[in-house]
Amino acid sequence: MEKEVLEILNKLENNHFEAYIVGGYVRDYILNRETNDIDIATNARPDDIIKIFNDKKMLVNKRFGNVVIDDVEITTFRKDEYNDSRFPKITYVRTVNEDSKRRDFTINALYMNKNYEIIDCCHGMEDLTNKIIKTIKDPSISFNEDPLRIIRAIRFAKILNFEIEKETLLALKNYAYKLQEISKERINKEIKKGIPYGVLEKEYDFVLKK
C-alpha cells in the first residue's frame, strides 16, 4: 500500500472516522493486477476532510462529496438518486453497506481497510471467483440510471476476461438505446480505458446501432 494512501487512512481514523480503499484498486489487488486507481470512502464529510488535511493541496467538489489529495479521491459515504444519468442527487449516509448500494458492479463494491481486510456487502468476492460482471441493483434500474455502465460492463468483461451475467447482459441489450443520452466524449473516454479495438463492432454491435 502506497505511503501516501496509508497516511490518508491513518489520519482519517486518528480523527475518529472510518476510511477504506474501495473499487478498482481492491478488485485488482485481489486479482493480483497492477493498478493506480485509488479511491477512498469515508464517513467524514468534505468539510471534515478539508479541516484534517489543511496542510495539503487539494481539489474539492462538494456537489459529489469528494476531495482529491495526492491524486487520491476521498469520497463521503453517500447514496445517489437519479433524475438524469449525469447529475444524481447526493445524500450522505453513515455506513459502508449503504454506500455500497450506489456502486455499479458487485466486483467494484469491495472495501479494504489499512490492514488489507476486505468488507464485502454485495457478494463481490463470489463474483470475482466466478469471473462474473453483475450489477448491484436490478440491472434494468442500474442501466436506466446511468447508461454509461453499459460501456463499463463491456470494458470490465474484456480487460478481466469475465462473463457478463445473464440478466445483466439482457438488460444491457435492452437499454443500449439509452446511450444516446450520453455524450460521445464520455463514451469514448470509457472505451479508451481498455476496450480492445474491434470488440464493440464484433461482439457488441447492438450497442453501436442504438
Image: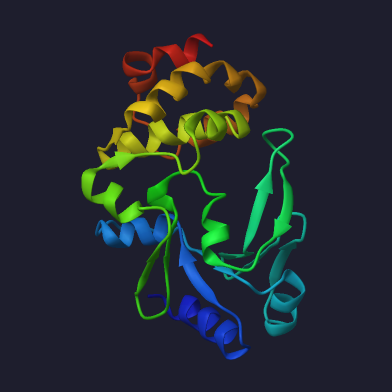
Q: Is residue 56 left or right of residue 40?
A: right
Residue 184 lies, in percent from the top left, at 61, 25
Q: Is residue 55 visible?
A: no
- Image point 31% across, 62% down: which residue? 29
Applied colour scheme? rainbow
Location of the C terminus by quadrant is top right
Q: Can you tell which quarter of the image residue 60 is in?
A: bottom right
Residue 131 lies, in percent from the top left, at 25, 43
State whether residue 23 is above or below residue 141. below
Residue nearer the viewer, 125 or 53: 125
Residue nearer the viewer, 64 or 37: 64
Residue 42 lies, in percent from the top left, at 59, 71
Residue 93 lies, in percent from the top left, at 66, 63
Q: Can you tell which quarter of the image residue 168 is in?
A: top left
- Image point 56% across, 32% down: which residue? 141
Q: Can you tell which quarter of the image residue 142 is in?
A: top right
